[in-house]
Image (cartoon, rainbow, N blue to C red):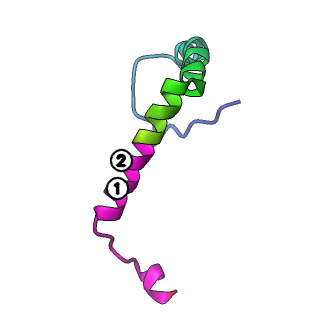
């Protein structure tokens, strides 16, 4: 069972049942794509881009990081 925090949820007019039905229909296709060779290659490319962006972005230290 899914628990939803209604205070932080973005309001939309699509009922949860419809969203869950859509997710059940799309999940097998999405899963098979990401298990495929092309999906794995795209995921690896995305991870490389993400890592490159994270390593080049300046990091701000938080008070917790400074104390450690």
Residue at point 40% right, 55% down?
51
Q: Is residue 34 above or below residue 50?
A: above
Please provide percent x and percent y for residue 26: 54, 15
Above-or-below relation of 52 to 22 = below
* Residue 50 sits inside the magenta stretch: yes
Confirm or deny contact between disc 1 and disc 2 (CB under 8 A).
yes
- The residue at 47%/41% (across/down) is 44
Q: Nearer the viewer, residue 7 or 37?
A: 37
Q: Nearer the viewer, residue 51 or 22?
A: 51
Q: Quick one: SS at disc 2?
A: helix
In the rendered image, the vertical position of residue 43 relative to residue 51, given as above or below: above
Magenta residues span 46-67
Residue at the image point whose x is 57% and y is 36% from the top: 4
Q: Is residue 17 left or right of residue 12?
A: right
Quadrant, the N terminus: top right
Q: Which residue shows up at 53% across the image and 32% down it?
A: 40
**Mark 1 residue element:** helix
Task: Residue 15 in the image: state x and y as whole percent.
Answer: 50, 16
* Label 2 environment density (alpha carbons within 10 Å; few <14, some 14–19, many ≥20): few
Provide the residue designation for mark 2.
Answer: 49
Name the residue beneath numbered marker 1. Answer: 52
């Amino acid at each position: 069972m899914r628990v939803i925090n209604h205070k932080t949820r973005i309001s939309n007019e699509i009922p949860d049942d419809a969203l869950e039905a859509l997710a059940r229909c799309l999940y097998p296709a999405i899963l098979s794509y990401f298990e495929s060779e092309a999906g794995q290659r795209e995921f690896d490319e995305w991870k490389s881009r993400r890592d490159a962006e994270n390593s080049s972005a300046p990091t701000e230290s938080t008070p917790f990081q400074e104390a450690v």
